[in-house]
Image (cartoon, grey):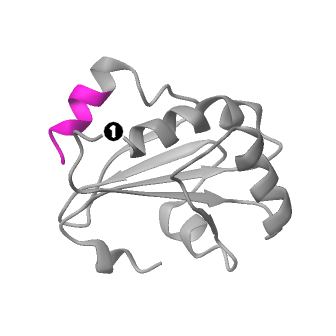
Amino acid sequence: IDLKDYNGKLIIINFWATWCAPCKKEMPSLDNLYQNKNFKNLQIFAVNMEEPNRSNAKSFFDNLDIKKLSIFFDNNSNFVKEFKLRGVPTTIFINKNGEEFARIIGEINFEEKKFVKWLLKYD
């Protein structure tokens, strides 16, 4: 992924792992956010932080009935280094100019009304 290819979009990068209970809890709400028709310029990258294992990651998504999100891997830890990641789940928000404007370390309900209202201002 080259984030420059997504200038003009609101980008959410969510870092997760299959063994992470908070990740499992928040992932369905992230998938539902991605399906929210109020967002016109939203791009979400769900980045698995483990050694790439497509079958484990796919099973994780299948068990949670994830419909829209795609699975991405950070093979060379480029994103980890770029964003100075400290743990999972971590969610990074990038505005239309390609600048990080918010970060959430820990679990969040991506469908919470106040959060969605706040995020829509950046779409």
Judge from the rendering whether residue 103 lies leftward or rightward of residue 59; answer left or right.
Answer: left
Judge from the rendering whether residue 61 lies leftward or rightward of residue 82; answer left or right.
Answer: right
- Work out whether residue 87 or residue 60 is closer to the camera in this orientation and state it: 60
Residue at image coords 66%, 28%: 25
Is 74 located above or below residue 35 in the figure?
A: below
Q: Which kind of residue does numbered mark 1 sit on?
A: Asn
Whether residue 122 is in magenta: the answer is yes
| Residues drawn in magenta | 116-123
**Rendered location of residue 3, percent (x, y):** 37, 74
- Work out whether residue 40 or residue 8 is closer to the camera in this orientation and state it: 40
Judge from the rendering whether residue 113 lies leftward or rightward of residue 41; answer left or right.
Answer: right
Mark 1, residue position:
36
**Rendered location of residue 29, percent (x, y):** 51, 32
Mark 1 residue element: loop
Is 113 located above or below residue 26 in the figure?
A: above
Q: Quadrant of residue 43?
A: bottom left
